[in-house]
Amino acid sequence: MTVTEQPIETPPRAPSPVHGFGTLAVHAGSPHDPVTGAVIEPISLSTTFAQNSVGKPVGLYEYSRSSNPNRDNFERAIAALEHARFALAFSSGSATTATILQSLAAGSHVVSVSDVYGGTHRYFTKVAATHNVKVTFSPSIEVDIAELIRPSTKLIWIESPSNPTLTLVDIRKVASIAHQHGIHVVVDNTFMSPYVQNPLDHGADIVVHSVTKYINGHSDVVMGAAAYNSEDVHEKLSFLQNALGAVPSPFDCWLAHRGLKTLHLRAREATKNATGIAEALQASPHVIAVNYPGLPSHPQHAITLKQHRNGMGGGMLSFRVRGGHEAAERFCQATKIFTLAESLGGVESLVEVPSAMTHGGIPKEQREAAGVWDDLVRVSCGVEDEADLTSDVLQALEKAVVGPKIKNGTA
Ligand SMILES: *Cc1c(COP(=O)(O)O)cnc(C)c1O
């Protein structure tokens, strides 16, 4: 959708000089129903819309793959929260990635950070090549970027923080080099959510989300979104949104829009919980290392302070537990509030062992070079009470690390 036709309650051009994030989250793209006055938009399930005469639809819509009220409203809200002129919604985060990669001409070259989301890595290595798009991965993109750019380079793909080691990239640094060569920078902002980080404000050209995670926030919708300011990009991506048809249902748009209205509350609570847990882990003798951007000990804490709202660390962290892979598995089975499961960003807290779950498909050497050790545990903090979560982590550590030693008579 374009922001020009939006109702009065959404600021016409972002960034909004007037409204704060919470106000935008609640009101952007949420007009009252003009007929009934309903405060909450109805779910518009109709796939087709009547026309008064040939080619003259009654309202704004013709066919719901092309556009529909619930998707338009959700897209308006995403554009407002990401300080973008335009936003588009897709049927998943992966479909968003695929659509952006499809917009590149055959023969194009992409530079990506090495530790991208597994599904993104799979698309880059196994699908992009089929339409002759080549991807080069870099473990230190800020340093290598100038060398990796070729005449055919069209896109740079960043995830900050990365998954599951929570490594940060200085978006401004990469974007300023990319822009000298006319190259667009994409940032996957799934881990931070628009509340903690707005990549377009740091020079990125396109920000993408797996809406499945923080934006929806209730682990009941799979969806994706992209937001940007360029009309050229909008022309290409909105054409492909319709042409490829990887679109979300009106019901999913409605659910995700409902979730988004409390993003600021959830993101603040998740950050508070993650901070408390990260500090408890750092103080524990059973822990080798903690990866959390909100800790002053994080090697790139200066980027946290520069790029994240109020230096927030977000709701994701990972840590290495003493006792190897077995201890990591025992830890995840010993938690009582944290559920052992993949995914992240929901109201409920989750734990997982990346080396055996989300990142199991990456060869061990490559995995360990990126810091994904067998003893690494990834934690997604939900919005339960901090004291309950912290004591759950500490009791699970005792069971995972000390328990077996007592049993074996080594403690
Ligand atoms: C989950 C995820 C994706 C993929 O999104 P889906 O909605 O599962 O297709 C992309 N990037 C990141 C960082 C993710 O966590």
Image (tube, rainbow, N blue to C red):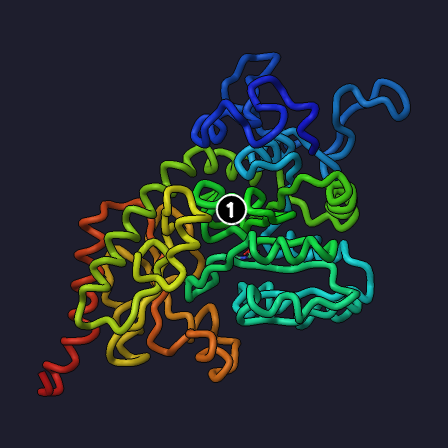
Q: Is residue 310 above or below residue 185?
A: above
* Image x and y of residue 157, in percent: 62, 60
Q: Ligand 1: which quarter?
A: bottom right
**Is residue 251 in view?**
no
- Tell me the amino acid under the disc marked 1: Val
**Is residue 375 in view?**
yes
Q: Camera-side residue: 158 or 319?
A: 158
Q: Camera-side residue: 233 or 359?
A: 233
* Image x and y of residue 64, in percent: 72, 35
* Image x and y of residue 322, in percent: 24, 77
* Image x and y of residue 215, in percent: 48, 43
In the picture of the structure, the residue carrying the numbered disc 1 is 221
Which residue is painted at 31% across and 57% down in the image? 295
Which residue is painted at 65% across and 34% down in the image? 85
Which residue is painted at 67% across and 57% down in the image? 178
Q: Give the quadrant of the C terminus.
A: bottom left
Residue furthest toward the bottom?
Answer: 409
Residue furthest toward the right?
Answer: 54
Which residue is painted at 47% across and 83% down in the image? 364
Q: Does the residue labelled 1 lie within 8 Å of ligand 1?
A: no
Q: Camera-side residue: 371 or 71?
A: 371
Badge 1 element? loop
